[in-house]
Amino acid sequence: MRHDHLITSKQLSRADIETVLDRAAAIDADPAAVADRHAGTLLGLLFFEPSTRTKMSFETAIKRLGGDVVDMGSVESSSVKKGETLADTVRVIEGYADALVLRHPKQGSATMASEFVDVPLLNAGDGAGHHPTQTLLDLYTIRENAGLDDLTIGIMGDLKYGRTVHSLAYALTNFDARQHFVSPESLQLPREVVYDLHQSGSDAQVREHESLEEVLPSLDVLYVTRIQRERFPDENEYQQVAGEYRIDSETLAAANDDLTVMHPLPRVDEIAPEVDDTEYAAYFEQAHNGVSVRMALLDLLLSDGGDDDE
Ligand code: NCD
């Protein structure tokens, strides 16, 4: 794998994905083997939007590889507050760190920022755009629970603003996957994403639905997402769709016994807590997988273009 920056999952071939997932599996099997591999390496964290999992799992990942972080901290306490541009901020912080992780509310910000830096820049979410490192841990979780071959997946909720959805949908075109998108009409996938998915040659494999009922029994994986309240231009529009597309034990009575339920988290009320203790629930395991997958990715990016020296 040889990428300077990771901005979107469209950059990732099936071979790239498998390289990261295989490396993550090896790390899970023997974490001690990589404990000092990146001693002295510093990862710059630039989070302009709230984050718990992504930020903390990147921090855990680099520390478990022997490195450390330099963290811009909150927007409130940084020079962004004084009006510094993103281009200037990343140019300064690249001088302190060996790679940068950026989360920003503006779609396209990661692409723009990457043009100003030479160290690898990882997009940890750009507005309603992309979130490719989440996709890698999602694929790892799918591979562990259901396998990535001959997969039938339902992706439900806010498909319009959900960046984890966009990234996952593109990545799945590398595999033999039937993708069923379930949402209210107002939160359907952006048309350009649907167009791209069709262009990828998987026409028969992409379907859109307004109801989960018609597809649930056929699913191997159900990927539930939060309605992205912060991205709605109008609070009234949010209120019209809030609370729709919620799953609970009753909903899941119609599911296949082997169904795996995933969610990038945080959840608001899309999955009833009673589902947590069922065999279906894989969302906490999914969040934990963020550490080994990000360790694998950092290891590959920071090892001189990803030479396989294990
Ligand atoms: C997601 C995000 O930030 O896009 N969270 C995450 O990184 N696990 C999903 C969300 O906020 O709904």
Image: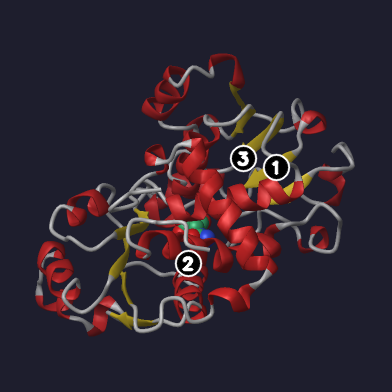
Residues at circles 2 and 1 in contact by the CB criterion of under 8 Å: no
Q: Which comes sooner in the sequence, label 1 or label 3?
A: 3
- Per the image, label 2 sits on a secondary structure element best described as helix
Q: Which comes sooner in the sequence, label 3 or label 2?
A: 2
Q: Is disc 2 surrounded by few (<14), some (14 to 19) or many (20+) residues within 10 Å?
A: many
Circle number at residue 222: 1
The Cα atoms of the two marked residues, 2 and 1, are separated by 21 Å
Residue at left offset 13%, top offset 74%? 92
Q: What's the amino acid at mark 2? A: Thr
Q: Which comes sooner in the sequence, label 2 or label 1?
A: 2
Circle number at residue 54: 2
The picture places residue 232, in percent across and down from the top left corner, at 39, 49
Q: Which residue is mark 3?
A: 156
Ligand 1 neighbours mark 2 (CB distance < 8 Å): yes
Indicate the quadrant where residue 102 lies.
bottom left
Can you tell which of label 2 and label 1 is closer to the viewer? 2
The picture places residue 84, in percent across and down from the top left corner, at 10, 71
In depth, the one of 43 and 274 nearer the eye is: 43
The relative height of residue 98 versus residue 210 in the rendered view (above or below) is below
